[in-house]
Image (tube, helix red, strand yellow):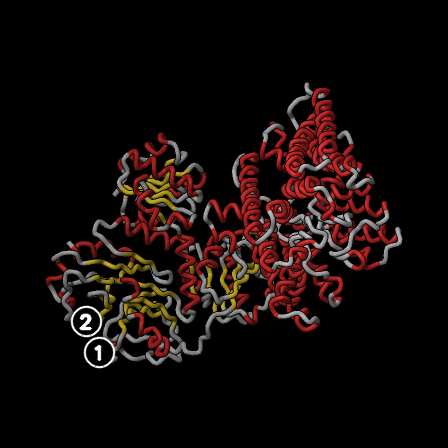
Amino acid sequence: MFHPKVIFRIIGMLLFLEAAFLSSSVAVALYYGENVVPALLYSIAAMVGVGALLVCKCRNAGRDVSRKDGYIVVTITWIIFSLFGALPYMLSGAIPGFTDAYFETMSGFTTTGATILNDIEAMPKSLLFWRAMTHWVGGLGIVFFTVAVFPIFGLGDIHLFAAESVGPMRAKLHPRISVTARWILTIYLGLTVIAAVSFFFAGMGWFDSVCHSMATVSTGGFSTKQESIAGFHSPLIEYVTALFMFLGGVNLSLQYMFIFKLRPKELIRDTEFRVYVTIILCFTVAIFFGLFFTTGLGVEESFRSSLFQVVSVQTTTGYATANYVLWKPILWLMLCALMFIGACSGSTSGAMKCTRITILCKVMMNEFKRIVHPNAVIPVRMAGKVVPVGVQSAILAYTVIYIFMLVCGIVVNMGFGIDFLSSFGLSVSFVGNVGPALGNYGPMDSLAALPAGVKWFSAFQMLVGRLEFFAVLLLLTPIFWKKR
Amino acid sequence: MRIVIVGAGAVGTHLAKMLSAENENVVLLDENEEKIGRMESLFDLQAVVGDPTKISSLKAAGADDADLFVAVTPDESRNITSCILAHYLGAKKTVARIDNYEYLMPKHKEHFVSLGIDSLIYPEQLAAEEIATNMKFSWMRQMLEFGGGSLVMIGVKVRSNAQIINIPFKELSRDIPYHVVALQRGDETIIPRGNDVIMPDDLVCFMTTYDQISYIRSITGKDEFSEVRNVIIMGGSRIAVRTTKMMPENIKVKIIESDLKRCHKLLELVDDRVMVINGDARDPELLRSEGIDDTDVFIALGDSSETNILACLAAKRAGVFRSVSEIENIDYISMAESLDIGSVINKKKLAASTIFQMMLKTDVASVKCLTFIEAVVVEFPVNRECYITRRAVKDLGLPDGANIGGLIRGGKGMKVTGNTMIQVGDHVIFFCLEHVLKKLEKYFR
């Protein structure tokens, strides 16, 4: 059952929300006396206008959101948000082309952090702030934000929530979804504030601190410097950034348990968290030795560079302090593997997520066990609990779709004449919402030179990857649209 | 004594039979008329049909003036509810059978008493504890601890390689560190006198202290028994689940269960140490592919006693040295003994020991049942001057079928001889046949 009026009404209301977010940029523009204020106001006017139109036209719609409506709302919202979010760039002339502006905005909302800009320092500060803001909103999820802040959707909350955040196994923190969302938002907000203050004391300016905190906690990756974090030339800032990227990659519900319920054991016992930490440690050590022996870097510098790149890529943030494509191939290949793995489910990061990888490995190991013990009934356990077979097959399906999407990306990119390594890197990076890729599109390269077709398809990959495939791809299946 | 038993299942009917044989006034209450109809004609008891959670049917069964109210249906919530109701109606003591380990924790005991439930029994847990002890000392049939381990009672099947066979007891040295309380030879239970001897294939009950266990092991010729590492359990019953939890950490356990649904349920109940296998444990092919050759102990915990006995025999033939079998049918226990099944687990007997304890008017520290002999071992604390403290043991005139196994004085286990005087503050461990138990009470008044 579809309720088009309900869907449009919700989208209309969400546009008001986007206008509210954009207003903060106006404040920044006024503070710095920038001449982009009219462009920002026109954009806000467009959002409010279209929003008001939709809400008025559909004001007599019911409050019930069906499950199918949930999927449509979430997908369309992300597309429309990026559309309107691109207006400030275009109207101000900072990014004149529609393709580039849309790519940049989608990259922002999906917390990918891949940019087509060639001279970030020359951008108006208000637009840099807007870029960071898109990360921050997209990190938790646009709909999530709304559920947490205004309970406007009535009974449909749960369907919208389910459509946007599809982790393999979700645990509610509170019987009511809106309260759960609010608690998670509190943690997120708290982390952001602490990050901003920490950055400031580590030596950034206020503006840079705020922008970076929003882009770090959301594991986005837009920086206010062309050289990313390397542009600050400060080891302290690099360590602080690594810390907050790491925290951004930890399940927010777990952090809630840790901080408010004082149950540190829960964190330590959590299988996914342990896998996450183990992966970071192993890769950091491996790459540290690689760097130490193949480059002229000292011990501390090798370690810092290794740690930063590993955390940045695994949490799918995409900041860089070194141009890793210049490293030995085995080293950037390891980073590429991390792009695929990702951090914890229930965090702001993208990619496969550690839970899925762990369950996949266990399913695989069980197949070996089954050959030795053909009659055994072998469970997959996560933190002592048995993972239902349904969840296991859903994860296998997820993996297949993930790989299919990667291959599609490679084919499309190569079709536009990009070399294999770069095509592969771009595809892995965008499906996982990481940012920097491999080959000619490493962390220090701009993506401005990509063909328009590649940009559009990449934007699609980011969206699909951020919403974990099923929500978006469901709309492309005939079953979804059948009346019965 | 008026005793109301709720639930005519395996445990309930056994208790009813046993108690009516002891001339108690037993009322059996169950919803299922078919189950209890026959009981009334076979045994001297009253059968009442009714819902045990209804006040009217509890009254009809006479729960209001019951001295002991025992709820042993398979459903713990019903047991708890009917105990609460019976207590409210006026039953003096109530016992509920449960199936939840958390309820047994000491910190919850007060709450259950305040609800009107005086005692909880968890036969599956008791059975699991017994099996786990058996894994630790696989060369013995049964081990019971008294006074927190100061004294232990050990049941051992003696073979022809034992040092102590064919020596009359009077010729054994006076300062041997153990006391033989009973022998089971075939169907006969012998309380040994000076001229008796231990013969091969006797089941011998030793009473000794914890540190002498290895001495008993060597004199009974059990030194070649190796440590248990791999165990196969047939049947994923509740006992099996509890057993895996009680088992020492270093033992690898495989549970073979024939019902696939139950297998999936089991996975949620056991931890990673346990492997669940779907199949029939009587199938030698399956046993071989699951490594029966490397298995030290085979434990049969299936629903039917017959199947368990057969499965144990099959496993023994496949090369397992030790087997443990759950046998609910009490008549089969001696048969299992003659087939050399090994240790026997019987839920009913375990439940019965708690009930014995509830029935005695004197305070007892514990009552424990032996599975292979129709006998109990009781720990009596001597709280004040009474008959037993006034005479030496040889002059007490103890009834036939009762025997003092030892005593605990100041936390230490001691052997008892004919000249020992029992003092106030001692704990006396009696070995006695089941029907003699009540006669012992008068010695403590």
Q: Quadrant of residue A68?
A: top right
> Left of B398 or right of it: where is B38?
right
Amino acid type for the residue under numbered disc 1? Arg
Residue located beneath label 1 in the image: B174
Question: Disc 2 sits on a residue from what chain?
Answer: B
Looking at the image, residue A410 lies above or below residue B61: below
Residue B305 in the image: x percent, y percent?
A: 48, 56
Question: Disc 1 sits on a residue from what chain?
Answer: B
Residue B211 in the image: x percent, y percent?
A: 31, 73
Q: Are marks 2 and 1 in contact (CB under 8 Å)?
A: yes
Whole-angstrom CA distance, mark 2 to mark 1, is 9 Å
Residue A301 in the image: x percent, y percent?
A: 63, 66
- Furthest-top residue in this view: A60
Frontmost residue, B84 versus A378 = A378
- Furthest-front residue in this view: A33
Looking at the image, residue B115 lies above or below residue A342: above
| Res. B417 mark | 2
Residue A251 in the image: x percent, y percent?
A: 58, 49
Frontmost residue, B388 versus B130 = B130
